[in-house]
Amino acid sequence: MSVVPTLHGIGVGPGDPELLTIKGVRLIREAGVIFVPAARSGEPSLARSIAAPYIDLEKRVVELIYPTDGRARQMLEDCWDASADTIAKTLQSEPTGVFLTEGDAMIYSTFIYTMEALNRRHPAVNIEIVPGVSSIHAAAAATGVPLATADQRIAILPSDSPETVLRAALGTNDTTVLLKLSSGSESVLDLLDELGLIDHAVWIRRCGQPEQEIVRDVRALRNQRLDYFSLMIVRRPRA
Amino acid sequence: MSVVPTLHGIGVGPGDPELLTIKGVRLIREAGVIFVPAARSGEPSLARSIAAPYIDLEKRVVELIYPTDGRARQMLEDCWDASADTIAKTLQSEPTGVFLTEGDAMIYSTFIYTMEALNRRHPAVNIEIVPGVSSIHAAAAATGVPLATADQRIAILPSDSPETVLRAALGTNDTTVLLKLSSGSESVLDLLDELGLIDHAVWIRRCGQPEQEIVRDVRALRNQRLDYFSLMIVRRPRA
């Protein structure tokens, strides 16, 4: 009986090790090899540190590089392909692996690129995905601001989207989640002010991590340099 | 030393008991009382059945009624208020409770109404929220369709939203998640056809539950009566 090489992509949640799922923890413990993304060789991996309480010291851990230094798309794709090749090669001798990724595996994650490269280059690798708690849901829980009820609508988009796009999202949705607040936050605050939404926004950074911080009067964010790992939930008052 | 009555709102995930978080399971086990939502008295509670493997047989379970029979908003609000009153009263003698809710606690959940009623009527009750895996993330994992990468945008809305709203969402977002496909599915399919997106949609019902079903050619949904617990992910091809 031959074993099909299988990679489980596991969302390890936003930061608190207790926000891993039971299934994620079980698969980490059962895995022969654990793949973890890092921005540079030797640099700490956030996904690995979140899952650390569940990683046996004897377990084989393979670091994969996903640069965050803003290099050109083609160079990034080369890295994703290299990671896929490493995974496929490793699974030949150790057919059960897990890939750890922050938050949920299918939203703004390095795992998505890896999955696509594996599907393209190594279709014999079986991929199973274990969903996780995304930072968006964790932010709603931490701030107490609901994302939606009943027939309400949600938009999720980067805060440096074009102004017309931001304006449309804020104007037509009950809840708008703005990601990566580090850049363009002044113009976002101006827009919230203009739309009468400045009192209906809450900002959070590093949700679920020890450095977590919540700001409920987002005017205080003006002229601040903001954490890249931050987001804002804007919730229109009900009519 | 007096103990502050505390309610933990716990998202128990979309259906698979293994998709509860470590924290959710711990708090269920530590709780003195477990509140579960049900549509009618004596009716099975989906949230309770998902968490059943972690609920000790001796544990006190209190059923709260959240009607789903389409009654008027005021009557629903009376039910939510009654649930909040029951919770506050119960926590007087048993100060640590959990409230179980399907998926994530802060998106389209009965917990949100309960939390708002508690904040209004019983502000002394301390509320803590434990995020969970929402059916949206679970659907992306089960189908292998990513929600977003890099600077992409997501919309989440009910499939019976006005056509102009659906059209705008599908036209301006990389990924659109359409919820509650049971009603209005023909007009949604017509719209996907018109916008050239019919081949870029996937439908899933009862994600993570034993009855889970995935349809990758959504044309097959025409003239079918669809499960209320279903959703569609529409992902525009990259330019």
Image (tube, coloured by chain):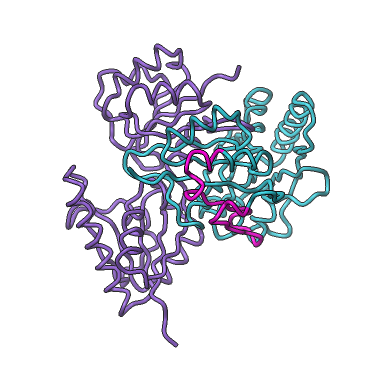
Chain colours: A purple, B cyan
Quarter holding the N terminus of chain B is top right
Q: Is residue B29 visible?
A: no
Q: Nearer the viewer, residue A35 or A156?
A: A156
Q: Is residue B17 left or right of residue A97?
A: right
Residue A228 appears in which quarter of the rendering? top left
Does residue A151 lie above or below B217 as drawn?
above
Q: Is residue B170 left or right of residue A124?
A: right
Residue at image coords 45%, 34% = B171
> Magenta stretch: residue B211 in it?
yes
Residue at image coords 68%, 46% = B228
Residue at image coords 24%, 26% = A225
Q: Nearer the viewer, residue B150 or A183?
A: B150
Q: Nearer the viewer, residue A167 or B8?
A: A167
Furthest residue in direction bottom, as rendered: A1
Residue at image coords 20%, 57% = A78
Q: Nearer the viewer, residue B114 or A112?
A: A112
Q: How many marks?
A: 0
Does residue A19 lie above or below A159 as drawn?
below
The residue stretch that appears in magenta: B191-220
Quarter holding the C terminus of chain B is top left
Residue B188 appears in which quarter of the rendering? top right
Q: Position of residue A129 (x, y in %)?
A: 45, 60
Q: Position of residue A135 (x, y in %)?
A: 42, 42
> Magenta stretch: residue A55 in it?
no
